[in-house]
Amino acid sequence: MNEYKKHPNEKNCNSVHWGYKGATGPDNWKTLCPDFADCGGKAQSPVNISTKETLNSENLQAIHLNYGKTKVNIVNNGHSVQFNVDAGNTANLNGKTYTLLQFHYHSPSEHTIDGKYFPLEVHFVHRRSDKDFAVIGVMFVEGKENPLFKAYLDKFPETPGEFQTDNNIDLSDLLPENKSYYFYKGSLTTPPCSEIVNWHVLTTPLEASKEQMEKFSKILNYNNRPVMPLNGRKIKKFDQ
Ligand SMILES: [Zn+2]
């Protein structure tokens, strides 16, 4: 139906090139294609999380993940390294059930906490409908070797391409045990920047070794959007 409303010369935004630097960088995403207009919106992500300004909320609920084992397809899509997962992994988030679509990484982190960047941030992207997404974001700090990276980092495609794993990965192993989180309403952090995301940024980070982080950061090559203004939005906190 929407096709009828589009101007015949309107570009298909899926084929529009965007990146993290220069003329096609974040400052210009909103003008690269009509459907990217949300990138100039008022409820954008990522944001800085100022911990002393977060509000404890009784309306938020604990995160319940119904993640199982899955084979994954590891894709370098030119913007990130993304793990596409099988259907059937769900998350119950504040009373609603979302399906996990994929997870992917940014380096350095996109969200900042009290102005501080982390070397890496992973986004578990869930969908309930076209207008209702939920992302669980987790920061990384330098520490122990990360088992997922140990198994697959050598096989991450360094240029656009993909790699299919043979083994089943237990997705529930990929998040920290404590799932206390910061919550706010924001957007996809990449074009089309749709303002449809319930953000859950965990307060507990994951660990990876310095070598792993350096190697992965090189592949990701600064794929983080700068923090966007809150424009009056409040960040809430749920303590597990
Ligand atoms: Zn992301």
Image (cartoon, rainbow, N blue to C red):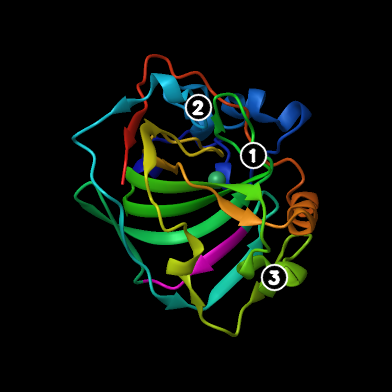
Q: Pick out the residue farthest to the front.
A: 143
Residue 102 within the segment the image draws in magenta: no
User: x, y percentage for residue 91?
Assistant: 31, 59
* Residues in magenta, as a range: 82-87
Q: Is residue 104 left or right of residue 6?
A: right
Helix, strand or loop status at disc 3? helix
Residue that numbered label 1 is attached to? 118
Chain-order first, disc 2 or disc 3:
2
User: x, y percentage for residue 44?
Assistant: 47, 27
Q: Which SS type dominates the magenta stretch?
A: strand
Q: Residue at x 61, y 51 (%)?
A: 105
Q: Pick out the residue farthest to the bottom.
A: 166
Q: Which is in the foreground here, disc 2 or disc 3?
A: 3
Under 8 Å from ligand 1: the CB of mark 1?
Answer: no
Residue that numbered label 2 is attached to? 37
Q: Quadrant of ligand 1?
A: top right
State the mark number for residue 150. Answer: 3
Q: Amino acid at mark 3?
A: Lys
Residue 97 found in image quarter = bottom left
Chain-order first, disc 3 or disc 1:
1
